[in-house]
Amino acid sequence: MGDSYAHDESQSQIVAETMWLQGALLNNLLYGIDLILFFICCKHVVRKMTPSNRKRQVCNLIFIATLFMLGTLGTFGNVNMTQRAFINHRNYPGGPARYETDMFWIPSNELGTVATVFGNWLMDSLLVWRYMAIFAGVSVVPTWAIITVPCLMLTASVGLGLLFLVETSRSSPFDAVTATVPYFAMTISLNVLLTMLIVARLLRFRSRLVRALGEEHGKYYGYLSMVLVESASLFAVFSSMLLITEAVNSSLAYLILQIVGQIQVNNLIASDHHPHNQGEELFGRHFHNEANIKPAIRRDVNICIKFSWAQYNNIPRGVILL
């Protein structure tokens, strides 16, 4: 006996609708995680705030709050679009999946798209800033040679992002492939390249510190390198999956597109495994033992100390802005 309540749509149409709906549900799940992590970040920032570092910590709070706000706008746009497609306009010709694609440009949904792109620009800019800060101590290479390629790539990412927003304001990312693919390819390249260079620099620091001071002094840089690689790889993997699924015209792209923005915000948080007091003791010993370090290594140890105090310790414990 047949099911009188069964759908009369094609299998491909059902798969597409499933991907849109499941993507919306996963987006909301990730947003819940972002909400919890946002409060954890704020708690760590406030706890570390003192009169001497108040300005820096307020900047951290503003940055974290801005990213979370952009993630919230992205989720709002996604929820509103899902309601329109599956409830308000369920009888749209072609079904909810077709409505999601044809009406991707409507203002409420475009708001979420703009928020996602702006968030990506902030994260890319911060990554370039971190790269410049870590490579500031390199004396064998001119400063202009260090910053030229990352700055050009960041400029290209912003330009392609603007083109992506213009194209999606009148169509969908799946119809504007000529704008979608270059934009995501550029931001993936920027994240992977700079993360690899930063990690290579940190591991070089670690190698020299281990030779000069012992194995325990290199653990900090190994941990930080691991956090950076894990955070960058998460966004790179899902963005690459989006490009691949869109290139082969797979319905899975509908799901991935909706969660990339929240994964991007999730990259703000790293595990809280490095005790702050232990870090202070570690670098305190670096200062006391520096007189016994070989002259050839002393310069890099100084750079390590300056980077560690000026960059990492100004960021809330357990929070890696990536």
Image (spheres, rainbow, N blue to C red):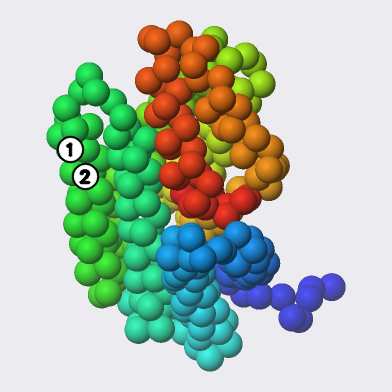
- Please provide percent x and percent y for residue 305: 47, 32
36 relative position to 303: left or right: right
User: Quadrant where the N terminus lies?
Assistant: bottom right
- Spatial CA distance of label 1 from label 2 is 5 Å
Q: Is residue 302 above or below residue 227?
A: above
The residue lying toward the viewer, choosing from 15 and 78, is 78
Q: Amino acid at mark 2?
A: Cys
Indicate the secondary structure of the residue bearing disc 1.
Answer: helix
Q: Residue at x 46, y 49 (%)?
A: 322
Q: Is residue 11 above or below residue 195?
A: below
Which residue matches tag 2?
Answer: 151
Q: Amino acid at mark 1?
A: Thr
Q: Residue at x 39, y 71 (%)?
A: 115
The residue lying toward the viewer, choosing from 69 and 73, is 69
Q: Is residue 299 above or below residue 321?
A: above
Residue 162 appears in which quarter of the rendering? Answer: bottom left
- Please provide percent x and percent y for residue 141: 20, 23
270 relative position to 66: left or right: right
Indicate the secondary structure of the residue bearing disc 2.
Answer: helix
- Please provide percent x and percent y for residue 106: 35, 82
Q: Residues within 10 Å of mark 2 (few under 14, many from 20)?
A: some
Q: Residue at x 22, y 32 (%)?
A: 146
Which residue matches tag 1?
Answer: 148
Total tally of numbered discs in the picture: 2
Callout 1 touching callout 2 (CB < 8 Å): yes
Residue 226 appears in which quarter of the rendering? Answer: top right
Q: Residue at x 65, y 35 (%)?
A: 281
The residue sitting at the right extreme is: 1
- Please provide percent x and percent y for residue 91: 52, 86
Indicate which disc residue 65 carries: none
